Image (spheres, helix red, strand yellow):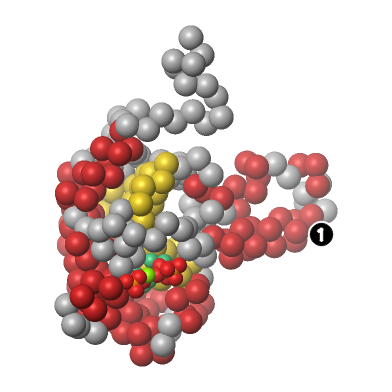
Amino acid sequence: MADPSTLPQHIAIVMDGNGRWAMQRGKPRSYGHQAGSDALKRTIEAAMRRHIPILTVFAFSCENWRRPRNEVRKLLDLFLKALNKEVRELDEHGVRINFIGDRSMFNQTLREGMAQAEQRTCNNTALQLNVAVNYSGRTDIVAAARRIAAAAATGNLAADDLTEERLNEELTLAHLPPPDLFIRTGGEKRLSNFLLWQIAYTELHFSDVLWPDFGADALAAALADFAGRERRFGGLSQVRSA
Ligand code: IPE
Ligand code: IPE
Ligand code: MG
């Protein structure tokens, strides 16, 4: 395990900027998504070299269905291609893959590919990779609230027994520590409905690097930024409490 005082145990990444990267080169947006998939591979390798145990990446949001059909189709094709092409190598490197988000919108081929990738890698321990597809933080919270409401309706939960811990149990990633570091590439300074509950005390790092250019150097910059943060969780700093 990495040293929790200076190295994040869990990094969440909004991989943004693929389209702009492609436009800058006079290419279609899908060219940027392809390059983005290579950047993810590089970033996984770099994270493993740094002994980061958990990565959670935003690949497709519930809101991304609003994009032109052609772009959505190309993104999902690319996703399937990456599943077929990369899973074996990730498995050989000890990566455990898990998908988060609502899969019911995807076709059977994609759903089977996802289930197979999870199954094949389920005993790996070098790095836990969570890929968020058709995920949104609010949807996650609403799904949790629905299960809680159902438990209450059947008399299995009293209102007073609903605690943060109990709600957390119903949310995605409940079995993992929350992200220590949130990285968003592409220059926009917003969360875009990625993990909301889970990042209540996460350190935020916004990078102007477009996702296809991300890799070991940009990760090093984010880690250096993180190492300089003082996490107080509502308490006082060492200096001020003296
Ligand atoms: C992120 O890059 C990838 C997805 C949202 C799927 P974008 O496609 O949002 O790239 P920009 O922000 O338009 O440059
Ligand atoms: C966030 O990027 C979603 C992913 C990276 C998958 P977007 O490009 O969709 O976010 P907005 O539209 O700029 O907020
Ligand atoms: Mg974008």
Q: Can residue 48 be seen in this snapshot?
A: no
* Amino acid, disc 1: Ala
Visible residue check, residue 72: yes
Does the numbered disc 1 mark a residue whose Cβ is under 8 Å from ligand 2?
A: no
Residue at the (47%, 80%) spot, across then down: 65
Tell me if 199 is positioned left or right of 40 in this view.
right
Judging depth in this view, the residue of 50 and 207 nearest the camera is 207
Please give the count of numbered marks on the rendered protein: 1
Q: Residue at x 19, y 55 (%)?
A: 215
As displayed, is residue 25 above or below residue 131?
Answer: below
Which residue in the rendered view is the most extreme toward the bottom?
70
Instruction: Examine the rendered structure and indicate whether residue 183 appears above or below residue 108.
Output: above
User: Which residue has dot 1 on it?
Assistant: 153
What percent of the width, then of the height, locates residue 74?
31, 84
In which quadrant of this rendering is ligand 3 seen? bottom left
Residue placed at 65% from the left, 48% from the top? Answer: 167
**Percent x, y of residue 43:** 22, 55
Tell me where residue 154 appears, x and y as whole percent: 81, 58
Is residue 184 toward the left or the right of residue 233 in the image? left
Q: Quadrant of residue 145?
A: bottom right
Picture quadrant of residue 52 = top left
- Circle 1 crowding by C-alpha within 10 Å: few under 14, some 14–19, many from 20: few
Res. 1 image quadrant: top left
Q: Secondary structure at mark 1?
A: helix
Measured as percent of width and height from the top left, residue 195 is found at: 49, 55
